[in-house]
């Protein structure tokens, strides 16, 4: 086994590598999407006669759906985190005293 502090530093460097690479890739895909939306604005309607979305490439219902899914995801995640906090607190209060008796010289 190694020094725990050294292991944490190595793990942090390992995780930082993919994140550092993902940021420019994300920006590149945003630019690519913007270029594609502009190209679609100038394109002629297809043979099926469908009208293209207004400037920007998005419709209001798409934006509403995306925002609502994001909010639902945040609320659901917060709910699970609160449930986990309550569960771990219950373990700490009810189970830990049985497993870990108080140290000598302390009140318990």
Image: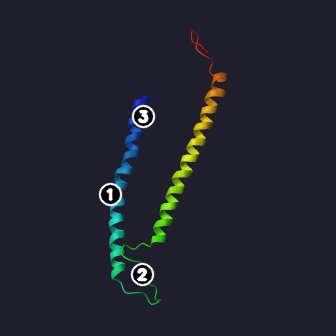
Assign a secondary structure to mark 3.
helix
Q: Which residue is painted at 44% across and 30% down in the image?
A: 4
| Total labels drawn | 3
Q: Which residue is labeled 1 in the image? A: 24
Residue 52: numbered disc: 2
Residue 10: numbered disc: none
Q: Which residue is painted at 35% across and 55% down in the image?
A: 23
How far is mark 3 from mark 2, CA to CA? Answer: 54 Å
How busy is the neighbourhood of tag 2: few (under 14 within 10 Å), some, or many (20 plus)? Answer: some
Pinpoint residue 91: horizontal percent, then vertical percent: 63, 31
Quadrant housing residue 13? top left
Judge by depth and name the residue closer to the eye, 86 or 13.
86
- Residue at the extreme top of the image, as rendered: 105
Classify 32 as above or below 79: below
- Colour approach in the figure: rainbow
Assign a secondary structure to mark 2.
loop
Q: Earlier in the sequence, mark 3 or mark 1?
A: 3
């Amino acid at each position: 086994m190694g020094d725990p502090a050294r292991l944490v530093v190595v793990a942090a460097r390992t995780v930082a590598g993919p994140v550092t690479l993902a940021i420019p890739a994300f920006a590149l895909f945003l630019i690519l999407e913007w270029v594609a939306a502009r190209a679609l604005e100038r394109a002629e309607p297809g043979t099926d006669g469908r009208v293209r979305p207004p400037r920007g490439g998005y419709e209001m219902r798409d934006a509403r759906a995306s925002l609502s899914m994001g909010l639902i995801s945040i609320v659901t995640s917060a709910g699970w985190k609160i449930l986990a906090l309550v569960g771990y607190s219950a373990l700490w209060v009810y189970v830990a005293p049985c497993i870990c008796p108080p140290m000598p010289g302390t009140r318990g």
